[in-house]
Amino acid sequence: MDLIEKLKILSSAAKYDVTCSSSGSTGKRQKNGVGNTSINGICHSWTSDGRCISLLKVLFSNICIYDCAYCINRVSNNTKRATFKIDELVNLTVNFYKRNYIEGLFLSSAIFRNPDYTMEQMLRVIKKLRIEEKFNGYIHLKIIPGADLKLIKEAGLYADRLSVNIELPSEKSLKLLAPQKKKENIIKPMNFVGKNILSNIEERKKYKKVPLFSPAGQTTQLIVGASSESDFQILKLAEKMYKNIHLKRVYYSAFVPVTKDSRLPKTTPPLKRENRLYQADFLLRLYKFSVNEILNESEQFLDEDLDPKTTWALRNYQYFPLEITKASYEELLRVPGIGIKSARIIIKARKYSRISFEELKNIGVVLKRAKYFITCHGKYLENTPLSPERIREELTGKNKMPLFSYNFIER
Ligand code: SF4
């Protein structure tokens, strides 16, 4: 099989690994010109400092000994299979890099032969890139669950980011849909990587020459909607991982029915659900919300019509309106339509000038949402309705009772 055919198969097989939005170039160039665009395997990702970078996103192999129900690469699925040779993938990466197609490599793999063997092959690729090719580009490496911790430790010295896919939100679902995967084989490497990242940070504070270990942190991916867990259960798990494993990010990936299996739902969950989970995740990571403030035992799913912060604000309307000239930074962060950047600017700006609604708009506050929850010098922006029901109707355009009940306080 030629290399282009392999690239097609192994980049297509990697497309369900979420780290970025996929894109490819189909542009046709002059016949005898220099360079060529490739539609296979180039995707975008974001570094921790917010830069958008292009990555070559591929599997090392799509030959798998496991039979996870939701996966296109499962052993029982009749699909074209391929495996890179070490040198093929190294040369491809360096070539793409030199031609400015990519700034890094995202490497994952199905499990062929066994977890250790697969992990060793991937490790050989990234070591060769770093040591022999002096490749300084970004490398995100997926850890194979069940691989020896020694291999993972070594991988962390060459990769910028490591990740283990948690895949399913509970052990029960794992047993049902991916019975060959064991919970401990997923959690153990996550814990291990988390501890090593933290100890590396500490060691480097003392000795600058200590080599970096996964400097861009670790992430994980979770499939939403292949199993029956609620948003509440999913977010509880994410919250636990953020607290305990020094995790940078959870990626939520809406289940796509790519194989037929009676254990799976027939359809994909609404993309809105994935989107709402990302919004709620932001509240956990950056806005200091706890899951219990967003959802609870009796309300297990995020509101489809409104973002989680607005839902929270309507449910807790007794805290509003906030006077924008006096509210603390933490209080401002809880106002729908006010983000981290705008909250910071408000705090700074009001020291030096008399803040107005016009100024808030210029700062980046989304007044369309925020206006219901703030006053400026004691006044609302307009004749703002004060009942959560009315606000909900205005924001959603729907005249219906919300999914939750709230304490309406008369003003
Ligand atoms: S181990 Fe990975 S590649 Fe193999 S079937 Fe399961 S999810 Fe797919």
Image (spheres, rainbow, N blue to C red):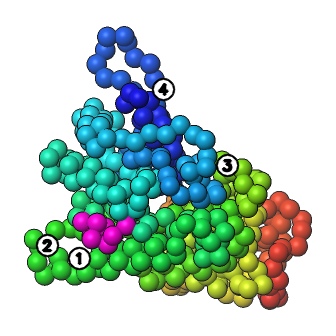
- Which residue lies under the disc numbered 4? 26
* Majority secondary structure of magenta residues: helix
Q: Secondary structure at mark 4?
A: loop
Q: Distance from label 1 to label 3 (Cα)?
A: 41 Å
Range of magenta residues: 147-154
Q: Secondary structure at mark 2?
A: loop
Q: Does mark 3 have its CB less than 8 Å from ligand 1?
A: no
> Disc 1 vs disc 2: Cβ atoms closer than 8 Å?
yes
Viewer-nearest residue: 261 or 397: 261
Is residue 150 located in the magenta-colored stretch of the structure?
A: yes
Which amino acid, by three-letter code, is at mark 3?
Thr
Viewer-nearest residue: 370 or 302: 302
Residue at figure coordinates x 71%, y 84% from the top left: 296
Q: Horizontal placement of 229 versus 53: left or right?
A: right
- Which residue lies under the disc numbered 2? 210
Q: Distance from label 3 to label 4 (Cα)?
A: 28 Å
> Disc 2 vs disc 4: Cβ atoms closer than 8 Å?
no
Earlier residue among tags 1 and 2: 1
Does residue 292 appear in the picture of this structure?
yes
Location of residue 153 in the rendering, given as x and y in whole percent from the top left corner? 27, 70
Q: Which mark is residue 200?
A: 1
Which amino acid, by three-letter code, is at mark 2?
Val
Q: Distance from label 1 to label 2 (Cα)?
A: 8 Å
Viewer-nearest residue: 404 or 339: 404
Q: Is residue 114 above or below residue 32?
A: below
* Nearer to us: label 3 or label 4: 3
Q: Is residue 152 above or below residue 101?
A: below
Which amino acid, by three-letter code, is at mark 4?
Thr
